[in-house]
Amino acid sequence: MAVTKIIELVGSSTTSSDDAIQAALAEARATLRNIKALDVVSVGLRGENLDEWRAHVRVSFLIERVSE
């Protein structure tokens, strides 16, 4: 039986919301295995001049059993 875990990340970019999503995904891929889904919860602008895109995402990945 497969079990997945979901974590939430926030990516940022000064270029676009898509780049902010890709930044979050790139970091997830660098630290997690077996990613099965990425859901975008919200995107928005932040910063003093509203010049930084932020993307709140949920990443779903399979849990691996540790061999003993």
Image (cartoon, grey):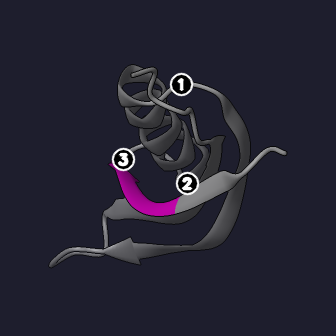
Q: Which residue is mark 3?
A: 13
Choose mark 3 or mark 1, whichever is in front: 1
Name, please, the residue furthest toward the right. Answer: 1
- How far is the residue under mark 3 from the one under mark 1? 24 Å
Q: Residues within 10 Å of mark 2 (few under 14, many from 20)?
A: many
Specify the label residue 17 is tagged with: 2
Q: Is residue 11 above or below residue 56?
A: above
Hey, what amino acid is under mark 2? Ser
Name the foreground residue: 55 vs 53. 55
Residue located 71% across and 59% down the image = 39
- Considering the numbered disc 2 on the image, is that residue within a helix, a strand or a loop? helix
Report helix, strand or loop for mark 1: loop
The reply to whether the C-beta atoms of the residues labelled 3 and 2 are less than 8 Å apart is yes
Give the residue pinned by disc 1: 33
Q: Does 45 lie within the magenta span? A: no
**Quarter of the figure with the C terminus:** top left
Along the polypeptide, which appears first: circle 3 or circle 1?
Answer: 3
Could you tell me the amino acid type at mark 1? Answer: Arg
Q: Does 1 appear above or below 33?
A: below
Amino acid at the residue labelled 3:
Ser
Residue closer to the observer: 15 or 63: 63
**Residue pictured at 58% horizontal, 41% vertical:** 63
In the image, residue 22 above or below residue 46: above
Instruction: Decide whether the magenta segment is chiefly helix, strand or loop.
Output: strand
Provide residue 54's location: percent of width, then percent of height.
41, 63
Question: Residue at position x 45%, y 30% from top?
Answer: 32
Tell me where the magenta segment starts and ends, as one range: 7-14
